[in-house]
Every structure is written in structure tokens, then in C-alpha cells.
Amino acid sequence: MRESLKSGIRCFGGRSWTITVRVYNELWRTRVFTAAAGLAYYFLLSLVPLVIVFASLLRFLPVNNLAFQLLGLLAALAPPESMSLVFSVVAGILEPGHGKVLSFGIVGYIWAATGGFSALIEALNIAYDVEDTRPWWRDRVQAFLMTFTVGVLGLLALFAILAGPHFGHLLMLVFPLPSSFALIWPILRWTIIVSTFVVGIELMYYLGPHGRHSFWSTLPGAFLAVGMWFLGSFGLSFYLSNISNYNKTYGSLGAVIALMLWLYISGLAVLIGAELNAEWSKEKRAMRAEKQAVEFS
């Protein structure tokens, strides 16, 4: 029994190392680092209309400065220099007399954001080694669906962060919940935050590439992408706050460069997770083929 367990551990370790090496090689073969730079450019173009729409819609909710509170929470993940640029855009949108900008923002957001997700679909097709035979309008529909599903999940995660660890006490006053809910809420809150991020990345992997794969098969890459995104975001924020200062080096362009770098890290995390899913799927097919060959022999 012990020898069988050791053999299984060695086999799993060997396959894990094989997948790691394959993913590393695929990163260079499919030019993931260049594709991530392209995604950063497209998502930067979609950011302004995205902020216009959500800031304009949040203004109608009965919460004071809700848009700025959400941006303040996002600043804990994104570099502070880049968020200063976004804050200035939101401040201009929320000024009196700018309500008409919402109609333009919706059209611009739909077009620009779907363009970013269309680029993501193309990059995911390359990562999964599949050929996209769908017409261009079908990719736009997929990008449109990804834009709003992932966007809603992102807002849900931000609202969970905004609620804070003591929100459970407020829910107990409004709803007939047990007294233990206040103790469970902090754990439940972080579960919601991590789960929404993971499900959002999974939806990108499930809806994006033109290939057949189950929803749960994207889970390893989604966890890797979310972990890399959190580590990369906090690491970049620490680097820009304590080691380097882009504002002194690049002047007024420092905020834009910091934001582009953060978007680049985000796109890179998503694509590396996709490469892991692709190689893991290939390894599972190889394992099934080996098992069938043993059974027939």
C-alpha cells in the first residue's frame, strides 16, 4: 500500500513537472507576452467608456459617493498612480450637467469593451491551439456576453469588499439570521470575493475559445490566473509606491504607464492560466489513451 502511494506521488509529481515545462515552452511559442501587451492596449481603450457607464449608473443609487468608494477599493489592487487618472475621469463625469454623456458612454463602452474581449478571444484561441471558424459577428456576440457577465461578477466582488467585515451585523438587523452569522460573515465575504473572481475568469475560458471543453475543466487555470493577478497587483503597487516613482520619471504620463503595466499583468495572468488549461487537457487525453492501451493489451 505504501509503495503504491509513493508510486502515485512520483507519477503525479512527474506529470506536474511535465505540464509546467510544456506551459513554459508554450508561453514562448504562442508569444503570450506580446499578446498580453496587445490586450493591455485594447482594455485601456475600453476603460474610459466603461468608467463613464458605471459611474453614471451608480449616481442613481441612494449611496453617497458610491463610485468613489468603489474606485478607492480598486486602488488597493491597482497602482495608486494609475487610479489617480481614473479618479479624475470620474470626477469630470459626475459634475452637474454631464448626464447626457451616458448615452454616448453606453455605445462607446459596448463597442470598445467588446473589441477588447474580441482580442482576448483571439488570444485564447491561440493558447488553446484551436482555429476560429466562427463569423466575425459571432465573436462580437461572444465578446458582448463576456463583457457583461464578467463585469457583473467584478462589481459583485467590489461590493463584497465595500461591505466590510462587519456587514454581517447589519444583515442580522434586517433579516432573521442566526447570531452565529456575524462570525461566519468575514469568511463568507472572502469566499464570495475569491469565488466571483475565479468564476469570472472561468467564464472567459469557457465562452472565449472556439473549442469544446467543460466548465469545470477550466478551474486549474482560473485559480492560477486569480492567484497571479492578486500577487502581481499587490507586487506592482508595492513596487511603484516604495521602490520606483513613475510620476517623477515620466511626468504626467506616469499614471498612464502604470495603468498599462497593471493591465499587462492582468492580461498575462489570464493567458498563462489558459495555457495551463490547454496543456492539462492534453495531458488528460494522453492519460486516457494510455489507460485504454493498457486495457486492450
Image (tube, rainbow, N blue to C red):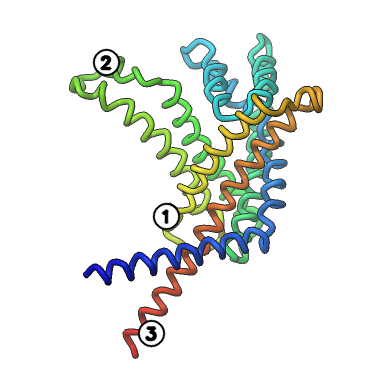
| Residues at marks 3 and 1 touching, judged by CB atoms closer than 8 Å | no
| Circle 3: element type | helix
Mark 3: few/some/many CA within 10 Å (<14, 14-19, 20+): few
Name the residue beneath numbered marker 2. 174
Q: Earlier in the sequence, mark 3 or mark 1?
A: 1
Tell me the amino acid under the disc marked 2.
Val
Name the residue beneath numbered marker 1. 215
Q: Which mark is residue 293?
A: 3
Alpha carbons under labels 2 and 1: distance apart = 36 Å
* Identity of the residue drawn at 45% across and 43% down: 198
- Of badges 3 and 1, nearer the viewer stands 3
Image: 146 above or below 92: below
Q: Quadrant of the C terminus?
A: bottom left
Tell me the amino acid under the disc marked 3.
Ala
Q: Which residue occupies the foreground of this view, 97 or 77?
A: 77
**In this rendering, would 118 be left or right of 178?**
right
Alpha carbons under labels 3 and 2: distance apart = 61 Å
* Identity of the residue drawn at 27% across and 71% down: 3
Q: Earlier in the sequence, mark 2 or mark 1?
A: 2
Q: Position of residue 78 (x, y in %)?
A: 60, 29
**In this rendering, would 175 be left or right of 24?**
left
| Circle 1: element type | loop
Tell me the amino acid under the disc marked 1.
Phe
Determine the image quadrant of residue 104. top right
Q: Position of residue 59 (x, y in %)?
A: 55, 16
Q: Quadrant of the N terminus?
A: bottom left
Mark 2: few/some/many CA within 10 Å (<14, 14-19, 20+): few
Q: Position of residue 292 (x, y in %)?
A: 36, 81
| Circle 2: element type | helix
Q: Position of residue 269 (x, y in %)?
A: 57, 46
Mark 1: few/some/many CA within 10 Å (<14, 14-19, 20+): few
